[in-house]
């Protein structure tokens, strides 16, 4: 019970640090929480926060270490949506740090022709389209159009903008 309350408090503190763009604080809080979490289910939100914060800080080794654990967990559970989401989070860090080839390698098997209406797949679909663009691979316009249509349908402004920029570039 005490551990659970501590993890909830730590998740709130890490989320607040993320809102403030204090990526180092997110990492410190989340990695402390990972030490006391007693199950992969309790670890997943902290893995994901570290992945995003580490990507923003260009610490891709740390991001990958946590991404592998989260991806393995979601694969074991058979949770395609969460697997795609966390892969997209890691892939975004790769793209933002000049490694679009690796991002494309990770996302290609997960992003199908139709991403459907799963809101959690839209950010990964946008990163996939951007990776195609940066690696000069064919299919950028089609991938950007699919991501754009899904983002617009969901009313997701940041992804709509990213998809439009990718398509226009």
Image (tube, rainbow, N blue to C red):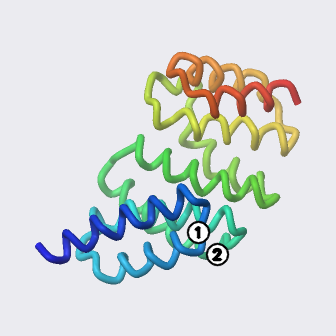
Q: Residues within 10 Å of mark 1 (few under 14, many from 20)?
A: many
Distance of label 1 from label 2 (alpha carbons)? 5 Å
Closer to us: 28 or 107: 28
Residue in the image at 82% along x and 37% along y: 133
Query: Label 2 near label 1: C-beta < 8 Å?
Result: yes
Quadrant where the N terminus lies? bottom left
Q: Position of residue 116 (x, y in %)?
A: 47, 23
Q: Position of residue 115 (x, y in %)?
A: 52, 27
Residue hosting label 1: 64
Looking at the image, is 91 positioned above or below residue 120? below
Residue hosting label 2: 61
| Residue 2 as seen in the image, left or right of residue 13 | left
Assign a secondary structure to mark 2: helix
Q: Position of residue 98 (x, y in %)?
A: 82, 58
Q: Residues within 10 Å of mark 2 (few under 14, many from 20)?
A: few
Quadrant where the C terminus lies? top right
| Residue 37 as seen in the image, left or right of residue 156 | left
Assign a secondary structure to mark 1: helix
| Number of callouts | 2
Residue in the image at 35% along x and 83% along y: 35
Taking the view exactly as shown, the residue that stands out farthest to the left is 1
Q: Quadrant of residue 65?
A: bottom right
Q: Quadrant of residue 109?
A: top right
Looking at the image, is 155 positioned above or below residue 134? above
Closer to us: 118 or 73: 118
Residue in the image at 28% along x and 70% along y: 7
Looking at the image, is 156 positioned above or below residue 82? above
Q: Position of residue 21 (x, y in %)?
A: 61, 61
| Residue 24 as seen in the image, left or right of residue 136 | left
């Amino acid at each position: 019970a005490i551990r659970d309350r501590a993890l909830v408090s730590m998740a709130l503190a890490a989320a607040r640090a993320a809102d403030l763009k204090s990526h180092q604080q997110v990492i410190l809080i989340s990695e402390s929480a990972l030490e006391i979490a007693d199950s992969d289910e309790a670890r997943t939100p902290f893995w994901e926060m570290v992945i995003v914060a580490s990507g923003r800080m260009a610490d891709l080794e740390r991001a990958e270490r946590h991404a592998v654990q989260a991806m393995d967990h979601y694969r074991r559970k058979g949770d395609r949506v969460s697997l795609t989401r966390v892969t997209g989070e890691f892939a975004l860090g790769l793209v933002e740090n000049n490694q679009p080839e690796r991002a494309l390698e990770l996302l290609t098997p997960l992003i199908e022709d139709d991403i459907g209406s799963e809101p959690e797949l839209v950010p990964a679909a946008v990163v996939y389209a951007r990776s195609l663009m940066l690696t000069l691979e064919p299919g950028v316009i089609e991938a950007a159009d699919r991501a754009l249509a899904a983002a617009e349908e969901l009313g997701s402004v940041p992804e709509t903008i990213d998809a439009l920029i990718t398509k226009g570039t």
